[in-house]
Amino acid sequence: MAEHPAYPVGLRLTGRRTVVLGGGQVAQRRLPALIAAGADILLVSPSATPSVEAMADSGELVWERRRYAEGDLEGAWYALIATSDKAANRTASAEAERGRIWCVRADDADAATALTPATGRSEGVTVAVLTTEVHDRDPRRTAAIRDILVEALGDGTLAVPSVGVRPDEAPRVRPVALVGGGPGDPDLITVRGRRLLAEADVVIADRLGPRDLLAELPPHVEVIDAAKIPYGRYMAQEAINQALIEHARQGKAVVRLKGGDPFVFGRGMEEAQALTAEGLPYTVVPGISSSISVPGAAGIPVTHRGVAHEFTVVSGHMAPEDDRSLVDWAALARLRGTLVILMGVDKIGRIARALVAHGRAPDTPVALIQEGTTAAQRRVDATLATVGETVRTAEVRPPAVIVVGEVVEVGDTAPAAPGTLT
Ligand SMILES: C[S@@+](CC[C@H](N)C(=O)[O-])C[C@H]1O[C@@H](n2cnc3c(N)ncnc32)[C@H](O)[C@@H]1O
């Protein structure tokens, strides 16, 4: 039976009886995929791992707490035999053979009529790897190949060529991807963000975020610089919106690559609204926001047990006395937790004065982290009383995240510098 390689197939198990014998580690690993396939699962086993028991408790399968008995496979389309009793496995396997039920054996793959491939998923496809070796089925090898494929699909290094448009076909409009690129370190973009970047025809990128990733893009990819340097050169939001709309209409794969998370002071929703107004779809890929990750990279937790039970992220773009500001600085001064200020380098002196004037202690620690998570990361410490002066003398420049609160002082040791891990 084992002289030919197995024939690969995908089973449609929705609503179809699947019998699992044994509730141990093998069942625990295989059951989630059977549940996801919608199988009607009967588990027969005197005991089960806590995870398998939880699946039974939540109604995802029916568990009969007893040993296997002949006849249990009746009506099944598929069986997974994984008990610790070899004799029972053999009897069940013979029952499956007689009943023409495809069956997997955890203890003896050669005696089984079906083999479980090493499987993984990445963005809409299932990768299933089966060996063609009939005498040496090392599961580590198929698992390793599966891992390579899933990882490469996930991070875009194995890019799927976009499906071409026939000349008589109208261009297919793809959702514009609003991708959060993370704080700057190219390793801190999400797997999905990286994949979409690898598949893009057009990338509209900000000044902040993982700029290094742009260098990896193939030459045919059009990169549009939407750099908005504070108080300097900028590309108006309207122009960015128009570029997104025009390229999406041409059926191109468009990525709007933004620093941090698209919806944290990122104007992501304005872009989404502009696309929606034109009837164009969009998708959002969340990113790691600098508001939490940059303090973290500098050894500052935004919360810490017994020190801060809240953190507030606030824009320091407008001075506290500016009528257009929507920030209630008096209320923030009354909070005991951590205050994280983005875009606040220019106004931090006035912000600190407002916080002290409304009751926050002048000796409250403050840390400014410039260009966090990049090779140029730099941390400068001060207090609310001194930060206005310190920011000038230490020549702190944007982009910087400013952290106000006792958490600044809880870290005893600084983490390894960014870039030393790779
Ligand atoms: C327009 S906001 C965008 C925030 C972004 N959407 C996020 O979630 O991180 C830009 C501000 O984010 C902060 N910022 C972003 N990346 C940073 C980094 N790598 N180091 C320090 N601050 C950063 C700075 O305060 C900068 O002025």
Image (tube, grey):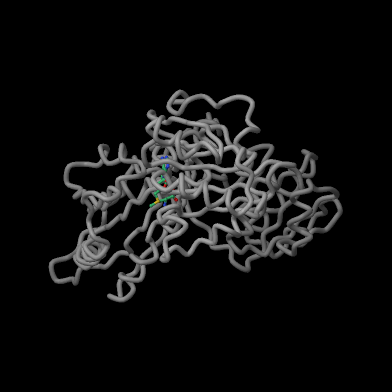
Residue 323 placement (x, y as % from top left):
42, 65
Residue 79 placement (x, y as % from top left):
67, 54
Q: Nearer the viewer, residue 136 or 242?
A: 242
Q: Nearer the viewer, residue 148 or 271?
A: 271
Tell me if I can see residue 278 in this picture. Answer: yes
Residue at 70 percent across and 47 percent down: it is 27
Residue at 37 percent across and 61 percent down: it is 267
* Quarter the N terminus occupies: top right
Residue 236 placement (x, y as % from top left):
24, 60
* Quarter the C terminus occupies: top left
Above or below, 16 against 122 in this view is below
Q: Nearer the viewer, residue 131 or 408?
A: 408
Residue farthest toward the left in the current orientation of the protein: 167
Q: Quadrant of residue 302?
A: top right
Task: Determine whether, in the image, residue 355 is placed left or right of residue 284.
Answer: right
Residue 283 placement (x, y as % from top left):
39, 62
Above or below, 322 against 354 in this view is below
Tell me if I can see residue 131 in this picture. Answer: no
Q: Quadrant of residue 57?
A: bottom right
Above or below, 15 against 343 in this view is below
